[in-house]
Amino acid sequence: MSAAAPVIFGIIGAVLLFFILRSLYRRMRDKHLPSLTFERSFSEPGVWAGDTVELIETITNHGFFPMFRVCVEAFIYNELRLTEFEPPKKDGMQFFGERFNIWPFMRIRRRHKIDCLRRGYFRIETVSVPMREDDYFFESPAEIYIYPKPLPIQAVVEAAGRMQGDDRAVRPLFQDPFTLSGVRDYRFGDTVSSINFKASSKTWMASGASSSPLKVNARDFCANRKLAVFMDFHLERDSGIDGKHYSRRVEVGLSYCAAIIREAIYGGFAVGFFCNCKQKDGSMVLRFPMSAGEDHMIGIFRAMAQLLPADGGSFPMLLDEAIEESVSDTEIYIISLCPDDKTEERVNTLRQMGNSIREILLSPIDEELYDE
């Protein structure tokens, strides 16, 4: 027998032992996979379209067995674009895999940056780990609301930031935070942000260093603090607008609504939102009665995130409900895709009831604001 034979047999034996041990380890690892927990969450529960968030993954080993080279696979919606991955060439979902090593009673946390491209509500459910015979699935739900990105509407109508109401109060109850009536002398209790430094400097120069040169902005007061936003999803068949352009105009319209509602809520208004659109639960109309506060605003935005770009119930019916409820002293915005005589009749009635109404008819110019 050759002197090299023992070396060759030793190498073969070592290789066989390696593959046997690796096979045994894989079996043991697959058996102990249930001792792992896999959790996912987004850094923010809701963001504007176009923002970036983080998808946070937390893997915890609750057992004594070490886990090496565990491959985790998952799918993510295309609208939630992973910044470190190449975008898919076709529509569908993004697939990505990760590999990690985790020692007993160890926790690993990983963060992935995600670009939120489209308005919508997205929920991811499970991740899978390939095994010898079948895949093992971890339930790891995570959800995020992507709100329509607020778009400025100064080019279309008077800015929502200048809403001041139609009625001036004899006894001022609320300062209008958006409209100035001039300047006045500083009084105790005025905030620093209300100081008009330009007027103060002119007064100081003219008076020769007066003892109280400070001037503050004098703001108008208003009694009308109610606002309602109506959006009409109806489109006439002979309008000449195809499905793609319809969807774009709907998105721009929702962005206008978001801008108006946000400015009004932060300005102290009670705001309502009404539209005739299809929703995922099958309902055809969305109603948010007038209320104030950030929680109310977030509720509206979350509902907007889940709306489908499709015509729902009767829009004149929504206006009829406002007329029946005797809505008055309210600033009303009506955003629509095409003119409607039935709507105009009800608009005139609402005006006669003491409401201020501004109509926005979406056009191809508005579509240009929508960036795909």
Image: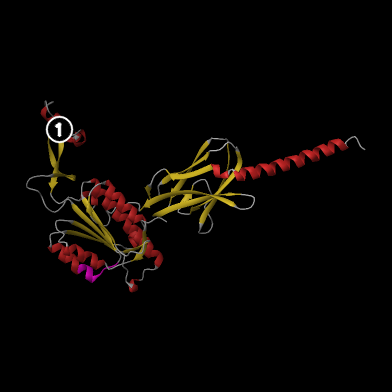
Q: Which residues are magenta?
A: 338-344
Q: Quadrant of residue 11?
A: top right
Where residue 360 appears, as percent x and y from the top left, is 26, 61
Residue lying farthest left?
A: 170
Instruction: Judge the density around disc 1: few (<14), some (14-19), many (≥20) Cα neighbours within 10 Å.
Output: few
Q: Describe residue 369's horizontal placement relative to residue 106 as left or right.
A: left
Q: Describe residue 178's horizontal placement relative to residue 303 as left or right.
A: left
Where residue 294 appears, as percent x and y from the top left, is 27, 46
Residue lying farthest bottom?
A: 238
Q: Is 327 placed above or below 25 here?
A: below
State yes or no: residue 343 in magenta: yes
Q: Secondary structure at mark 1?
A: loop
Q: Residue at x 14, y 34 (%)?
A: 215
Q: Residue at x 26, y 66 (%)?
A: 315
Q: Quadrant of residue 307?
A: bottom left
Q: Describe residue 349's horizontal placement relative to residue 7 as left or right.
A: left
Q: Describe residue 231's horizontal placement relative to residue 167 as left or right.
A: right
Q: Residue at x 86, y 36 (%)?
A: 6
The answer to whether residue 151 shows anywhere in this view is no
Residue type highlighted by circle 1: Gly
Residue pointed to by mark 1: 189
> 149 or 282, which lies in front?
282
Q: Quadrant of the C terminus?
A: bottom left
Q: Quadrant of the N terminus?
A: top right
Where residue 73 appears, as percent x and y from the top left, is 56, 49
